[in-house]
Image: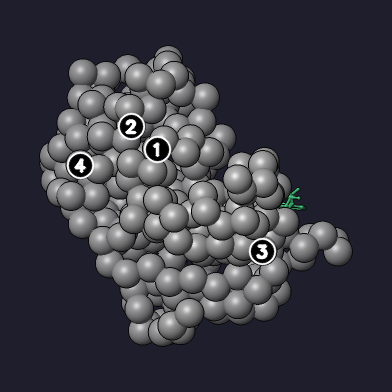
Amino acid sequence: MITNPSSFLFVENISKNFKGLAALTDVSFQAEKGEVIGIIGPNGAGKTTLFQIISGFTKPDQGEIYFEGNVINGKKPHEISLLGIARTFQIVKPLRTLSVLQNVMVGPLAHSFSFSQAEDQALSILKLLELKDKKDVLAENLTLPEKKRLEVARALATSPKLLLLDEVMAGLRPTEVDRMISILQQINEETEVTILMIEHAMRAVMACCSRLIVLHHGEKIAEDTPKNITKHPAVIRSYLGQEPC
Ligand SMILES: Nc1ncnc2c1ncn2[C@@H]1O[C@H](COP(=O)(O)OP(=O)(O)O)[C@@H](O)[C@H]1O
Ligand SMILES: [Mg+2]
């Protein structure tokens, strides 16, 4: 693998233990601007821990995270957010008693936009996420697919350069998965934001991602194009659950 701290995102030899349990062991990869990369692997593989570390919520035991050439591990989550990295949470966390519009305005206001600028930006993001007609609904009254889209909208509202999506399609019906796939493709085209997406829905990562990284028991066991990933014996054994023919 080419190691290049000056690439857009460079994750270098990250390890993390929780009381003796190796959640991540020596994981490295890089992402270039505008790429959409899928992170896949069984439950407990370390996927969310990787996002926790990139976004500053958890400190790695070893390794470095470089973003646009600078080391960011050790920084606090809000500092990392201001550098241009946004994430969604696997368990959606909207501000329940605020309206959909207010939830999305929090991001632009944190970047010291004026109130009307923040509202304009929030409305254009809600349009992209197909939530504009729900703008005055309280977040707690949204359906699950709508809450998932609001989670993406809130992350986008901080104007990120890098967007970390943690299972934004989990629990969605196939038609809602399709809707999210086309929304993410549109977001990537229109904003050129780089996306790392943790996803179990293979159909979604196949459609959205140019590259997939497979984690298993905290180790990166494969990295390849969606087309080629299923040919890796280690992936078939540990994830897809059958030996190659
Ligand atoms: N804060 C934590 N404290 C203790 N163990 C944790 C913590 N976060 C994650 N783990 C453990 O680390 C492993 C990887 O978890 P996680 O990154 O959430 O996996 P994934 O997102 O791939 O399902 C799991 O065994 C999980 O129980
Ligand atoms: Mg997870």
Q: In which quarter of the image is residue 34?
A: bottom left
Residue at figure coordinates x 54%, y 78% from the top left: 12
Disc sitting over residue 204 in the figure: 1
Task: Give the position of the C terminus as an image quadrant.
Answer: top right
Q: Do the residues labelled 4 and 3 touch (CB within 8 Å)?
A: no
Which residue, given by chain and number where applicable, does mark 3 sit on?
219
Q: Quadrant of residue 43?
A: top right
Disc sitting over residue 180 in the figure: 2
* Crowd around label 2: few <14 · some 14–19 · many ≥20 (10 Å): many
> Which scheme is used to colour this image of the protein?
one colour
Q: Helix, strand, or loop for circle 1?
A: helix
- Mark closer to the chain start, 1 or 2: 2
Q: What residue type is labelled 1?
A: Ala
x, y percentage for residue 19? 85, 61
Q: Which amino acid does label 2 sit on?
A: Met
Q: Which amino acid does label 4 sit on?
A: Gln
Can residue 219 be seen here?
Answer: yes
Mark 1 vs mark 2: in front: 1
Cα–Cα gap, marks 1 and 3: 23 Å
- Mark closer to the chain start, 4 or 2: 2
* Crowd around label 1: few <14 · some 14–19 · many ≥20 (10 Å): many
Q: Quadrant of residue 185?
A: top left
Q: Which amino acid does label 3 sit on?
A: Glu
Which residue, given by chain and number where applicable, does mark 4 sit on?
186
Vertical comparison of 72 with 164: above or below = below
Disc sitting over residue 69 in the figure: none
- Mark closer to the chain start, 2 or 3: 2
x, y percentage for residue 26? 65, 73
Q: Helix, strand, or loop for circle 4?
A: helix
